[in-house]
Amino acid sequence: MSKKKANIKVAVTANIDKALRQLKKKIEREGIVRDMKRVVYFESPTQKKRKRLIRAIKQNLMRLANRGELYTKKK
């Protein structure tokens, strides 16, 4: 688990649902939930390596899709 403390602020206006969605997104981006899950159970080094690899592949695919460089076959 990372030792840095997360300090996440969300401006709450009239719409509480919107503020809650923003909070969830910020927590996800910071990786707080992922770090908490890591502490709950033991992961072998090979599992950690595999998860990192899968995460990197997904991030690269998303990056390519956002750029429009990811082509899919259309039937």
Image (cartoon, rainbow, N blue to C red):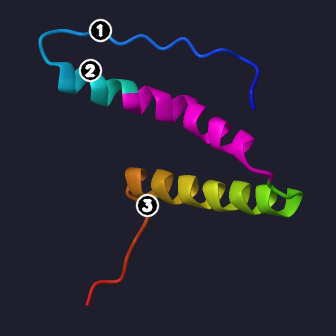
Magenta-highlighted residues: 24-42
| Most foreground residue, 35 or 52 | 35
Q: In what element is the residue under mark 3? A: loop
Residue 19 badge: 2
- Between marks 3 and 1, how big is the CA–CA gap? 36 Å
Quadrant placement of the C terminus: bottom left
Query: Sequence order check: which comes first, mark 3 or mark 2?
Result: 2
Q: Classify residue 36 by image quadrant.
A: top right
Q: Which of marks 3 and 1 is in front?
A: 1
Q: In what element is the residue under mark 2? A: helix
Residue type at mark 1?
Ala
The reply to whether the C-beta atoms of the residues labelled 3 and 1 are less than 8 Å apart is: no
- Between marks 2 and 1, how big is the CA–CA gap? 7 Å
Image position of 5 with respect to 40: above or below? above
Query: Sequence order check: which comes first, mark 2 or mark 1?
Result: 1
| Most foreground residue, 51 or 34 | 34
